[in-house]
Image (tube, rainbow, N blue to C red):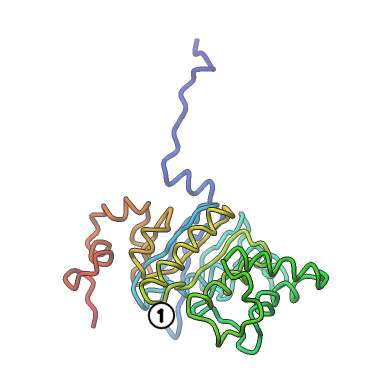
Amino acid sequence: MTDQAHAPIYDLTDADRIASDAIIQVRGLRKSFNGREVLHGIDLDIPRGEITVIIGGSGSGKTVLLKHLIGLIRPDSGQILVDGEDICRMDDRQLNRVRRKFGMLFQEAALFDSMNVFDNVAFPIREHTRLSKAEVREIVLRKLAQVGLTGAEEKMPSELSGGMRKRVGLARALALEPEIVLFDEPTTGLDPITTAVVNRLILDTHRALGITFVVISHDIPGAFAIANRIAMLFRGDIIETGTPAEIQASTNPMVQQFITGSAEGPIQIV
């Protein structure tokens, strides 16, 4: 008779584990613009509480995919499950409820030039809550402290460096205590030192908060420095996913060419 206490346990594969603990699941996602298909039936799992970096060249569909995750673009077909709910089937009211789980740091930080740092960070709090002025101020100052900008609340965006603008954008993305933060090319246009500072900020903030980060990037050293998992998007398809070590060891010639920046290989730039 089999001893139930010592019955065999079936190990989950890494893919099964990730899928079972995914906060976002993308299934069969397709999107075309003017007859040109940009996303070709994408499947992707975003593990809860980790940093997932999506890499790929210009025009590969990275930003289009990111906008789908937050419902800014509707797909032609497929599913996007956020905590098990398919946002592709939601009306605007339902979608706005799910969007409260997200914060987003856009390219160039997308700050309001007419508002100072304090009001930029306070904007989503004022728009989506009925908190008192004192409560709003407490949250804004706390978020600015988290990104190392204590004392900068009266500055205008025109007075900020590129790195400081990214910090303000991140503080605003964190203002409503999201479960997921999306980063669209957070180091684009920054010099190497500022790029390293922003990547360190992302990593330190994630360690402090433990929430889910999804980063769109073509900064390969940065991706390897901050990611728990990396997915490579090439011409609308996810062609490889894995840990940084697995991606570095990939035998896919397109992955190797992209991560090494070689001009020679199957990816041809015309």
Q: Quadrant of residue 116?
A: bottom right
Front-most of residues 159 and 73: 159
Query: On screen, 115 above or below 71?
Result: below
User: What kind of element bears circle 1?
Assistant: loop
Residue under the image location 26 percent in, 52 percent down: 249
Residue under the image location 66 percent in, 74 percent down: 121
Residue 233 x/y as whole percent: 37, 66
Question: Relative to residue 95, is residue 81 drawn left or right?
Answer: left
Residue placed furthest toward the top: 1
Q: To which residue does mark 1 refer?
A: 189
Residue under the image location 50 percent in, 60 percent down: 26
Residue placed furthest toward the front: 151
Residue placed furthest toward the bottom: 114
For the residue carrying disc 1, how many other residues have a C-alpha within 10 Å: few (<14), some (14-19), or many (20+)? Answer: few
- Residue type beneath disc 1: Gly
Query: On screen, 63 above or below 54?
Result: below
Residue 252 x/y as whole percent: 25, 58
Q: Quadrant of residue 248?
A: bottom left
